[in-house]
Amino acid sequence: MSPSAAILPDIGARLLYRDALLLVIDKPAGLPVHPGPKGGQTLTDHLDALRFGLPRRPEAVHRLDRDTSGCLALGRHAKALARLNRLFATGVAQKRYWALVEGGPEADEGRIDLALARRSDDPRSWWMKADPAGDPSLTLWRVMGRSSDRATTWLELEPITGRTHQLRVHCAASGFPIVGDPIYGSAPRHGGPGLQLHARRLALPLYPRKPPVVAEAPLPEHMRAGLSACGWTADTRPAPAE
């Protein structure tokens, strides 16, 4: 059995929302959405199982990092993809993430407004850095809980822009890197706790004169102990979308 098959034995069981245009799935950590330079299986290899009678498989509308879990939107056909792409391109798709960070901010809420650019000119490199000459990038955050020794903090993060590695770079540049991040944080490259970043909630105003489509992904097992130390319980609910 391939590693990806072990991570995702039944993609249908991870379906969070389904209608004629849209699917939302709970992507597991450890599985890339699209093929990379090193090859290997990706989420795309599993999407034929989500056709539900349509002639073609659905396609991802946006991306999540390999090690980020949670809500991922899929368009079911070409017209659906075009419609969904507009929501993300115009910034009206609302994404909320939960993260466990090292230390944490002193305030209870705030914003991180730091432009981002690639570290390298190599087109194969996804690593980013804060750079005033880069692309404008904005993240809103609020504290959901703190550990008793204040060594870690549970944050809700809302990226207003959608830059590569935005949340990871913004948190690290602000002095509270995401736990388990081997690139921008202090985690080892191998054998660490896993990236503690989860796409918790997705709200899409897909249909005129109707409330947004909302999907929520349950917290993955590898994040439960850390967030429990910061006050998370199984029935915690995020604030409603505006």
Image (cartoon, rainbow, N blue to C red):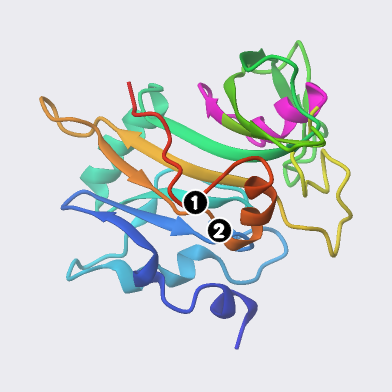
Q: Which mark is residue 70?
A: 1
Q: Give me the residue at 69% from left, 16% from top.
A: 115
* Label 2: few (<14), some (14–19) or many (≥20) C-alpha neighbours in 10 Å: some
For mark 1, give the secondary structure.
strand
Q: Which mark is residue 236?
A: none
* Outermost residue toward the front in this view: 148
Q: Position of residue 217 (x, y in %)?
A: 43, 51
Q: Which residue is mark 2?
A: 220
Mark 1 and mark 2 in contact? Answer it, CB < 8 Å: yes
In reply to whether residue 163 is colored magenta, the answer given is yes
User: Image quadrant of residue 38?
Assistant: bottom right
In reply to whether residue 1 is colored magenta, the answer given is no
In this picture, is 182 found above or below 158?
Answer: below
Which residues lie in the magenta part?
Answer: 157-175
Q: Give me the residue at 25% from left, 30% from top.
A: 205
Please name whichever residue, 104 or 69, is drawn nearer the observer in this view of the structure.
104
